[in-house]
Image (cartoon, helix red, strand yellow):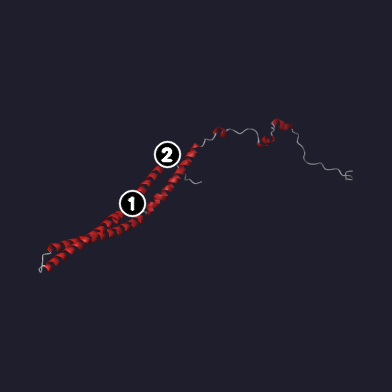
């Protein structure tokens, strides 16, 4: 028989430990969900808000560049019609600003796309790195919690069992032997002496013409 044995001192202690594990599972799942949700929200914001914004800005600034170029061209046309050279410095300065703003919008759009790709890679790496922990809180710990619940239920059932009747178990045996109890009769020591023994050996039969005649 093995010397190892369970030393359960408190069923309530098992229940408290099980409740602690359940709380840890809930907290772990919440942390995993929050971490992944933060990345999802950031990617969604960049893709649907910032990327859409800079696409719209590029279209608008392209129109501003087109208008600025038209102003420069109009100024040059007016100068040619008058036979001289009118100053178009303001129009050219406006054109340079419009082109710079267009280039800025294109740069911001490229940066936004780069951030989206980088965050998507980070999300993949995050899921891979927390996969063992996620398996623990989703499978291992719930299994352990189930085992602790069954252990507590079994111990409760064991404790609720009625105690054995020690008085009946420790009572001295009666005088009746097993053979007397089976036949339903009792033989006292006095009656044993009155019983005549019988010889079970058969007497030999006398044959006619034997040597004793």
Can you tell which mark lies on residue 136? none
**Relative depth, front residue between 81 and 109:** 81
Q: Which residue is at a point 13% across and 66% down the rendered structure image?
A: 78
Of residues 179 and 207, the one nearer the viewer is 179
Instruction: State which tag comes first along the sequence, 1 or 2.
Output: 2
Q: Residue 21, position in %: x, y?
A: 39, 45
Residue 170 sits above or below residue 24 on the image = above
Q: Where is mark 2, residue-wise?
A: 12
Label 2 secondary element: helix
Q: Which quadrant of the figure has residue 18?
A: top left
Q: Which mark is residue 37?
A: 1
Residue 193 seen in the current view: yes
Q: Residues within 10 Å of mark 2 (few under 14, many from 20)?
A: few
Is the residue 183 above or below the residue 38 in the image? above
User: Which residue is nearer to you in this view: 193 or 8?
Assistant: 8
Give the side of residue 173 with respect to residue 98, left or right: right
């Amino acid at each position: 028989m093995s010397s190892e044995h369970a030393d359960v001192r408190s069923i309530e202690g098992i229940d408290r430990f099980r409740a602690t594990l359940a709380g840890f599972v809930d907290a772990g799942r919440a942390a995993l969900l929050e971490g992944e949700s933060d990345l999802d929200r950031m990617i969604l914001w960049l893709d649907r808000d910032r990327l859409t914004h800079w696409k719209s800005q590029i279209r608008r600034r392209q129109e501003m560049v087109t208008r600025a170029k038209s102003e420069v061209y109009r100024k040059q046309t007016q100068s040619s019609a008058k036979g001289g050279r009118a100053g178009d410095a303001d129009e050219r300065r406006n054109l340079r600003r419009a082109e710079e703003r267009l280039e800025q919008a294109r740069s911001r759009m490229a940066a936004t796309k780069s951030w989206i790709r980088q965050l998507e890679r980070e999300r993949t790496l995050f899921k891979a790195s927390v996969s063992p922990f996620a398996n623990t809180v989703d499978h291992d710990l719930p299994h352990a919690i189930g085992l602790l619940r069954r252990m507590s239920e079994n111990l409760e059932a064991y404790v609720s069992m009625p105690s054995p009747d020690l008085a009946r178990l420790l009572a001295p045996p009666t005088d009746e032997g097993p053979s007397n109890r089976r036949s339903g009769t009792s033989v006292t020591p006095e009656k044993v002496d009155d019983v005549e023994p019988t010889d079970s050996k058969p007497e030999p039969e006398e044959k006619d013409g034997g040597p004793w005649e």
